[in-house]
Image: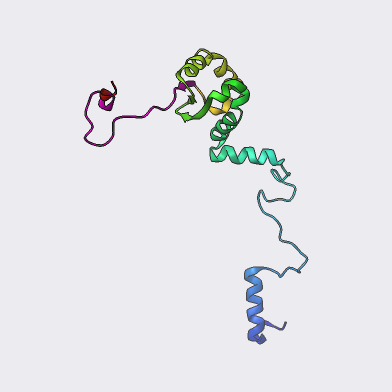
Amino acid sequence: MSERGSETEAERVWLRLREVFGRPRSRRERPKPKGDNLPYGKGRDPLAAGTVLDAVTESLGWVTPLAQTDLTAAWRSIAGEETARHAAVEGFADGVLLVRCDSTAWATQLGLMRSQIAERIARDFPAAGVESIRFLGPNTPSWNHGRRSVQGRGPRDTYG
């Protein structure tokens, strides 16, 4: 390029851009990484898939719901085959495991086994957050329907 006074407009633009943006890089030359983004810097090693999934479930707050799902799936092994035929996990409410039984006799029997079942759950599924277990009897129909239901025995009066 020539002296400062005899430059063309194109040369002046080129010099100004070079002054602002620095010298041009070749296509093969990569930009230098800044900060923590170094190629062999801290935190750049590959992680195992299990480690990544554990971190994701922890950050999203899925640990307890996943542990509760695992507990529900393993109910047969926790309670035993015969017991599992007559009692099933209905859900979880505020740290209470709700188990629906076929009859009140099964609910009573499982109530007697509560400590063994709770101990097994605490040992195998600590992340489920089960603080106690409630055994429910079978669903019974409700005779209270509508806004105008009245106190009393209801239709059972007419049975005999």
Front-most of residues 134 and 66: 134
Q: Is residue 22 above or below residue 91?
A: below
Quadrant in the rendering for residue 1: bottom right
Q: Is residue 6 above or below residue 153?
A: below
Judge from the rendering whether residue 7 lies leftward or rightward of residue 143; answer left or right. Answer: right
Magenta includes 159? no
Residue under the point 28% across and 31% down: 144
Q: Position of residue 12 (x, y in %)?
A: 64, 81
Residue occupying the far top of the picture: 112
Q: In the rendered structure, which segment of residues is drawn in magenta?
A: 132-156
Magenta includes 141? yes
Q: Position of residue 159 (x, y in %)?
A: 29, 23
Front-most of residues 134 and 40: 134
Front-most of residues 49 and 67: 67
Front-most of residues 104 and 122: 104
Residue under the point 54% across and 32% down: 64
Residue under the point 69% across and 43% down: 43
Residue under the point 61% across and 25% down: 76
Q: Position of residue 41 (x, y in %)?
A: 72, 46
Quadrant showing the C terminus = top left
